[in-house]
Structure formats: C-alpha cells, structure tokens
Amino acid sequence: MTLFPMNAGQARARLVQLGAVLAATALIAGCGSQYRSVVTPINSSGPAPQPGSFAAVVSAPSVTTPGIVTIIDYAGDSVLAIAR
C-alpha cells in the first residue's frame, strides 16, 4: 500500500513537473556565474623596427702604434664593441 496512490497520468505529470523544476534550477544556477567580456579589443602592432645602422670609428694616435676600432650602433645609441 502506498501513501499517495496515483494513476499513470498523475505519475507522468509529476515527472514532467520535476523535470521542469530541475531544468529551471540548472538554468538559474548557470546564469551569471562568469563574466564574459562584451568587446574584444584588437591590438595593433607596434612600429616597424629600425634597420641596423652601424658606424666603425678607427683611432690611431700615431703611425707606429696600433689603433682602436669602436663599432657604434647609432640607431640605438650604444657602443657594440671595442677592438685593438
């Protein structure tokens, strides 16, 4: 003997109601749990790299003494190498 006797039609109606309640609960629980960005920014590329620009400077105090060579990257304003 059951506590709540019901026929097959009532059982189907209860099953449909339970399914609707579970679907609504899942829908409400899944909404708004994560922030989704609205606008996706398009990052522009930077300026083109400058071409390599080098200068070699030779200094010799006299004809008999060895000189010094300095290689300068004048696009980046830095001394790359000093050689004797």
Image (cartoon, rainbow, N blue to C red):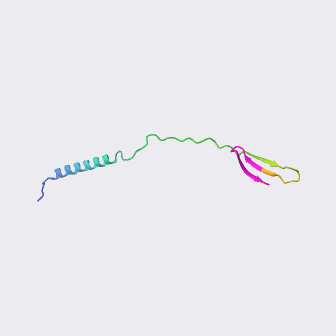
Viewer-side residue, 24 vs 35: 35
Q: Residue at x 39, y 47 (%)?
A: 34
Q: Is residue 19 left or right of residue 65?
A: left
Pick the residue in front: 34 or 27.
34
Q: Residue furthest bottom?
A: 1
* Left or right of residue 39: residue 61: right
Q: Horizontal and vertical percent for residue 39?
A: 46, 40
The residue lying at 23 percent from left, 50 percent from top is: 18
Magenta part mainly helix, strand or loop? strand
User: Residue most toward the right?
Assistant: 64
Split into 4 quadrants, where in the image is the N terminus?
bottom left
82 magenta-colored: yes
Q: How many marks?
A: 0
Q: Is residue 9 above or below residue 47?
A: below
x, y percentage for residue 22? 27, 50
Residue 11: x and y in percent read 18, 52
Magenta residues (range): 70-84
Name the residue at the front extreme: 61
- Where does the image place residue 21, in percent across and percent down from the top left? 25, 48
Q: Is residue 39 magenta?
A: no
Q: Is residue 50 left or right of residue 2?
A: right
**Residue located 34% across and 48% down the image:** 30
Q: Nearer the viewer, residue 36 or 70?
A: 70
